Image: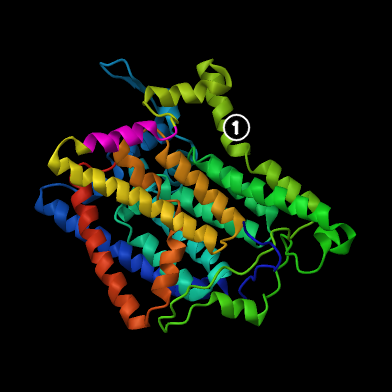
Amino acid sequence: MTDLETPMAVPRAPALRRAAPALLGYAAVRALGLAVLAGWSAARGKSGYTLLTARWDSLWYTRVAELGYGYEVRLPNGDVHSNLAFFPLLPWLERLLHALAPLSYADAGFAVSLLASLAAAWGIFAVTDVVYGPRVGVCAVLLWAVLPVGIVQSMAYSESLFTALAAWSLYAVLTGRWVTAGVLAALAGLTRPVGLAVVAAVWTAGVVSFVRDRSSGARDGGADRPGGARDDERAPEVSSAARARRVPQATGAPHAPRAPHVTITGAPPWRRALGMLLAPLGTAAYVLWVGHRTGRGPLGYLDVQAGWRNGFDGGYAFARFAADKFTSFPSALAGAGLILGVGLLLWLYVIGVRRRQPLPLLVYTGVVLALALCASSYFGSKPRLLLPAFPLLLPLAQALARLRTGRSALVTAGVAVASAIYGAFWLNGSGPP
């Protein structure tokens, strides 16, 4: 599905300077969203800051940070909402920042999210830059910023933290830093259940690299052949022809370039094996700890999620939810919108496959999509659950990058304003659970 032959380039320009346009653009979009939220909330007699830090899941995270695990709410219908459903890395960071600075737990959660969102934007740029070049990288970051539910990136939630860890783990895989990839994947596994997507990407890339080494044998010199990047080395530049293929020109060219072929070996076998062993430790440790604490064994975490009516049913509940929308005319429009939205997600994924995105990105995105769309969770939360699936934006980023700079900036600004207004309306209404 993805050819694995030519090594990925690690850009030679200083990383922060290279990412600066993307980060400045991202910060501007998020500042606009926060300003609109503050004004909209004030007009309704509410606090925008409270909506970001002390509502819905953010309250559960701060409670874990302050009091630890063990709190639960029993609902009249018999459901049990336990804070064991919330993975521990964000509360740990909130507790650490609260201890180091004069911040409340809610303030600490907001600070972590702001910093993590910038780290996520940088990671998205780094991944896209190494595959398609800096212009597409900037566009990918801006598209992630202007998503309709992009305001969640500034909430005291774990989406930004997880996306940052996932993006940098994927970048480490693409550039041959296997131990780093494994450590970041383990941390992602301590952040959200969807950390399994990062683990799957690391493991798939590792297995493919070992299979290729075995098939190539002495002919290619195994994992130590020239061109592989180690954890302490930079990968060499790709050829000028490969780089030319992946940098879109702002001339309205009708066909987007495919991703350059990429090797995902980049380290001696022991480094790859160590990275693969480290990757699942975060998820496994927390799930096993919950099972021990509840006395229900390895499946204890699934029981905790069942108390929240969360589970994996292959998309059956989501399909029924969409079908029920067609029982009356006004709601039928919402049902049609849901179908079109899911169709768009699948279409973008297929485009990524056809353009030969690197295999780790395809595996990661596929697992995020499957877990978000096929879970029987609260359906209003699905858009924010899809926030980490940033590789879906790469085909759109390529299209945006092919526009002239002025037109691209105009389109992005218009969508940013619409996103800011929608985010303020959403949080002042139903909002995320």
Residue 432, position as x, y percentages in the image: 29, 42
Q: Quadrant of residue 223?
A: bottom right
Nearest to the observer: residue 36 or residue 243: 243
Total residue callouts: 1
Q: Residue 324 colored magenta?
A: yes
Residue at image location 33% in from the left, 43% down from the top: 106
Q: Is residue 402 above or below residue 196?
A: below
Q: Residue furthest bottom?
A: 251
Q: Residue under label 1, please give it.
A: 285
Crowd class of label 1 (few under 14; some 14 to 19; many from 20; radius 10 Å): some
- Secondary structure at badge 1 equals helix
- Magenta stretch, overall SS: helix
Residue 375, position as x, y percentages in the image: 41, 34
Q: Which residues are magenta?
A: 314-325
Position of the C terminus by quadrant: top left
Please state which amino acid type lies under the numbered disc 1.
Ala
Q: Residue 383 colored magenta?
A: no
Residue 311, position as x, y percentages in the image: 43, 29
